[in-house]
Amino acid sequence: MKNYIRLIHTPIGKMIAAADENAITSLDFTNESELIQNSDTPLLIRLEEELHEYFTGKRITFTLPLSPKGTPFQKGVWETLCTIPYGERISYANEAQRFGHPKAIRAVANANGRNPIAILIPCHRVIASGGGLGGYSGGIEKKKFLLELEEKFAL
């Protein structure tokens, strides 16, 4: 199966998106300044449009098919992340409980850290039980920005 990539500029930095013919397979932050041969596949063009709408407060849900690569456990955690509504925050403990494994807080948090599709699979909505931001693979400042953005535009 063919893979396509596209560099997408966002208010919090550059992101590299990847897709196959059927779904988005990854979206991650990058500091790379290399020239990337941007694909014009409709899926990645639509992703760029939906991200722009998200960052301008015009979109709270994404419509694109996703196909993250991971273990069955990780995929289950990522599916749970997708049930967290826009603008809401839950704790890692609450996420583990929603996932059906209330004692697996650390394993759930580790799966969040391996989320290959940033923003669309909203691991940024999970915070520490004490109210701290916890971690974020893109950097804590990006997590803070995303949470504040959603708080600003939440209905």
Image (tube, helix red, strand yellow):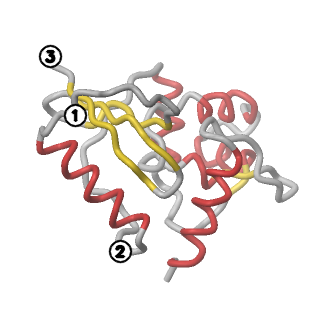
Numbered badge on residue 1: 3
Q: Residues within 10 Å of mark 3 (few under 14, many from 20)?
A: few
Which residue does the image show at 53% across and 58% down from the upper left? 84
In this orientation, which residue lies closer to the viewer: 69 or 33? 33
The residue tagged with tag 1: helix, strand or loop? loop
Q: Is residue 7 left or right of 82 when viewed as pictured?
A: left
The relative height of residue 151 versus residue 76 in the rendered view (above or below) is below
Residue marked by disc 2: 58
The residue tagged with tag 2: helix, strand or loop? loop
Which residue does the image show at 54% across and 36% down from the upper left? 77
Mark 1 vs mark 3, foreground winner is 1
Q: Earlier in the sequence, mark 1 or mark 3?
A: 3
Residue 131 placed where, x, y %? 83, 59
CA distance separating discs 3 and 2: 33 Å
Q: Is residue 119 left or right of 102 when viewed as pictured?
A: left
Residue marked by disc 1: 38
Residue 35 placed where, x, y %? 32, 27
In this orientation, which residue lies closer to the viewer: 101 or 22? 22
